[in-house]
Image (cartoon, rainbow, N blue to C red):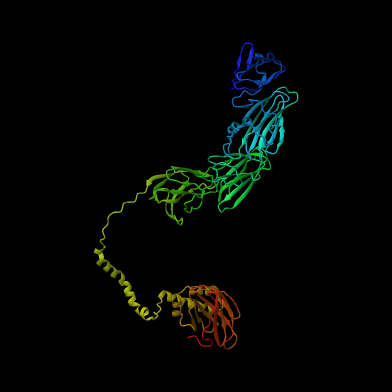
């Protein structure tokens, strides 16, 4: 233990009074910081031996002191602010050379006495590496070389894959530090340092042997006190749960930023794969990452793990520069992978840019979750808890999964306070399909056991960030009413049921009576055309006749009339327009042809499709007798060429009416409809032709 006492006498200022509790090497120096300092003196008392040193510029002493020794440094009072002092040794928490260490690294294969082993403390793990932890893991060793021929060798505890950090090597009177590896076959000098270039040096622990430090004196030095500080990153307890950090990560669940934001470890030069850290950061979340330079050059790679198992990769600078990133959609975790071509210590800091949603470092879902017994990476809310989140500037909806564990369901509500800029909904979901079966605006609801949803939607303020906070109020489990005892009295109402049945069925009996011929004998009922329908069909026929008789044909009027005709009941058209001059009926199609006005070469063609679609349909008009016939015009407009009209697709149970104008003077006309039905060619050909010269009846 070191006791420092600072006091003032009448003539002298006491700089230091040091009591030595443990024997060992010691060095002390008191130096004047101006031209000269009067009264500068140093007194060392070791048992019966007393050493007194004085000088105007510097007083220095180095040697071995036994337990109980004292060191006193003084200076004239007028120079009490004009000095600096330094020391090595005499600290309780340091290790010291209790006996003379061997001069050299033991020969390969020989036994090593255990006192030579220097244990290292290791208090710094992956996520708790703050400055206090790192400093507390540094071991200070103080030793001395008592002659120019004296050398010290000491073994450093560790195992393959460890990284040893030489914090510093100090030897005020001159010495060098050699780094050796030792195994059963050979001793090998790795490198050596002098005090000036020994700050923060990384050393690989040998793969197949031991690590040794050897201290050698400078020429002409009688006694040299030295000190070095070292720490070790252990390979066997680097990862959570123990073991070496792997790359890629294979140490279980991601680490939460609720617990850790700074991470540190080391990479041995023998570790070609490097290290990786998996972090619980989800989709559409903004954060920053800042690498810290400690020792060695590291390369950083950010892997975004997506829901479908794929990966997206970002590379960031190894320089201590902050990089801001936003995770893509469907991100379930991010992985920071670190590699190096040399022995290195890496460290990085993760800083969330946006606050978490309900504790998740991820943007809340915007779609209803599918109920599942497995955790999907998003926070699952519980009743009787308070949660907070936010809607960022381009986010309008947040949806959270709600877990109900009460066997008969729970009675819950949302308590969001009085001033809320969002709307809340509690949504009960079907546990198989995920469909919404019940919902409230946050008011009390009885919701069954299982996985459900809470939906939060902004009321306005588009383009701004809205923070919200709410509590899921819990009113206890739902208690269904106990079933009562019931007695079946239905037999008392048998007569009533029979009477009501007869009364309710009597109208259908009347309808059956009216339609008995159609139902029992299969006769077709006469078509009943309402008066208004009859008048409409008459007007359509008059419009078509007038339009065709006019010198300037109004195509718009003709097409309008034909479209209206196509929307009319087929049987009503047949009944009102009279028997067509040609009618052909099959299971798949019915074709009717009317002459609209005598003296004109125009026909009205009606087609009614059966229960199946016709594709690539076409109608051909031909003249079995007389001169050739060709088509001059079609309304509504259709593609036609010579004697054929292209009708394309005609849907099942549809009707089509066309006005066809012909060229030529045939004595008779025939029609042929062809197309594909169920991808099979089909043709409808009437078994007779139209006598074109016959007058209209």
Left or right, 339 with respect to 391, comes to right
Towards the viewer: 58 or 203: 203
Quadrant in the rendering for residue 197: top right
Numbered marks: total = 0
Task: Give the image location of residue 469, x and y in percent.
Answer: 47, 43
Going 46% across and 74% down the picture, which residue do you hit? 568
Between residue 644 and residue 15, name the one nearer to us. Answer: 15
Pick out the residue farthest to the right. Answer: 219
Q: Residue furthest front?
A: 110
Is residue 552 something that shows in the picture?
A: no
Residue 576 visible in the picture: yes
**Left or right of 330 on screen, residue 99:** right
Task: Provide residue 172's location: percent of width, then percent of height.
Answer: 70, 25
Quadrant for the N terminus, please.
Answer: top right
Relative to 54, does residue 530 appear above or below in the rendering? Answer: below
| Residue 88 spot, x, y in % from top left | 65, 24
Where residue 85 sits, quadrant-wise, is top right
Q: Considering only vertical position in the picture, is 432 above or below 221?
A: below
């Amino acid at each position: 233990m070191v006791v420092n006492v600072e006091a003032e006498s009448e003539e002298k200022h006491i700089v230091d009074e040091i009591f030595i509790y443990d024997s060992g090497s010691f060095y002390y120096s008191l130096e004047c910081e101006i031209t000269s300092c009067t009264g500068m003196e140093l007194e060392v008392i070791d048992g019966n031996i007393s050493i007194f040193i004085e000088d105007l510029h510097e007083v220095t002493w180095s040697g071995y002191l036994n337990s109980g020794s004292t060191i006193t440094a003084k200076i004239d009072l007028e120079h009490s602010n004009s000095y600096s002092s330094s020391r090595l040794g005499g600290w309780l928490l340091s290790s010291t050379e209790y006996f003379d260490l061997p001069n050299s690294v033991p020969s390969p294969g020989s036994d090593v006495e255990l006192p030579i082993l220097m244990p290292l403390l290791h208090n710094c793990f992956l996520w708790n590496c703050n400055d206090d932890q790192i400093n507390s893991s540094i071991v200070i060793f103080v030793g001395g070389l008592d002659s120019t021929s004296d050398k010290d060798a000491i073994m450093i505890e560790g195992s393959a894959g460890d990284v040893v950090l030489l914090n510093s090597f100090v030897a005020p009177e001159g010495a060098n530090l050699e780094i050796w590896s030792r195994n059963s076959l050979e001793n090998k000098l790795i490198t050596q340092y002098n005090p000036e270039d020994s700050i923060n040096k990384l050393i690989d622990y040998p793969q197949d042997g031991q690590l040794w430090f050897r201290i050698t004196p400078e020429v002409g030095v009688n006694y040299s006190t030295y000190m070095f500080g070292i720490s070790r990153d252990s390979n066997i307890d680097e990862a959570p749960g123990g073991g070496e950090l792997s790359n890629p990560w294979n140490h279980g669940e991601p680490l939460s930023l609720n617990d850790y934001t700074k991470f540190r470890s080391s990479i041995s030069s023998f570790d070609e794969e490097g290290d990786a850290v998996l972090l619980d950061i989800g989709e559409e979340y903004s954060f920053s990452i800042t690498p810290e330079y400690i020792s060695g050059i590291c390369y950083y790679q950010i892997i975004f793990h997506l829901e479908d198992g794929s990966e997206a990769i970002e590379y960031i600078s190894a320089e201590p520069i902050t990089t801001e990133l936003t995770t893509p959609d469907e991100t379930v975790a991010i992985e920071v992978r670190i590699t190096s071509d040399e022995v290195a210590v890496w460290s990085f800091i993760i800083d969330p840019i946006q606050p978490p949603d309900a504790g998740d470092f991820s943007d809340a879902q915007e779609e209803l979750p599918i109920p599942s017994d497995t955790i999907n990476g998003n926070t699952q809310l519980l009743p009787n808890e308070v949660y907070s989140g936010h809607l960022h500037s381009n986010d309008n909806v947040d949806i959270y999964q709600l877990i109900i564990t009460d066997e008969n369901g729970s009675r819950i509500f949302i308590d969001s306070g009085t001033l809320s800029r969002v709307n809340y909904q509690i949504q009960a979901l079907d546990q198989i399909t995920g469909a919404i079966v019940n919902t409230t605006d946050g008011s009390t609801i009885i919701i069954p056991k299982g996985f459900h949803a809470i939906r939060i939607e902004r009321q306005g303020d588009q383009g701004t960030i809205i923070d919200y906070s709410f509590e899921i109020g819990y009113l206890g489990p739902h208690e269904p009413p106990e079933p009562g005892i019931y007695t079946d009295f239905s037999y008392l109402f048998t007569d009533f049921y029979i009477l009501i049945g007869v009364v309710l069925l009597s109208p259908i009996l009347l309808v059956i009576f009216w339609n008995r011929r159609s139902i029992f004998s299969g006769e077709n009922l006469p078509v009943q055309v309402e008066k208004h329908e009859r008048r409409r069909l008459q007007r359509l026929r008059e419009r078509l006749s007038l339009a065709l008789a006019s010198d300037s044909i109004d195509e718009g009027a003709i097409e309008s009339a034909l479209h209206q005709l196509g929307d009319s009941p087929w049987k009503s058209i047949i009944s009102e327009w009279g028997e067509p001059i040609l009618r052909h009926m099959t299971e798949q199609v019915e074709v009717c042809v009317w002459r609209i006005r005598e003296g004109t070469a125009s026909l009205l063609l009606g087609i009614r499709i059966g229960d199946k679609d016709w594709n690539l349909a076409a109608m051909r008009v031909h003249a079995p007798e007389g001169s050739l016939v060709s088509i001059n015009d079609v309304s509504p407009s259709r593609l036609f060429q010579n004697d054929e009209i292209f009708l394309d697709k005609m849907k099942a149970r549809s009707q089509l009416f066309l006005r066809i104008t012909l060229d030529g003077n045939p004595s008779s006309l025939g029609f042929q409809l062809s197309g594909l039905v169920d991808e099979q060619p089909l043709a409808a050909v009437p078994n007779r032709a139209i006598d074109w010269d016959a007058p209209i009846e």
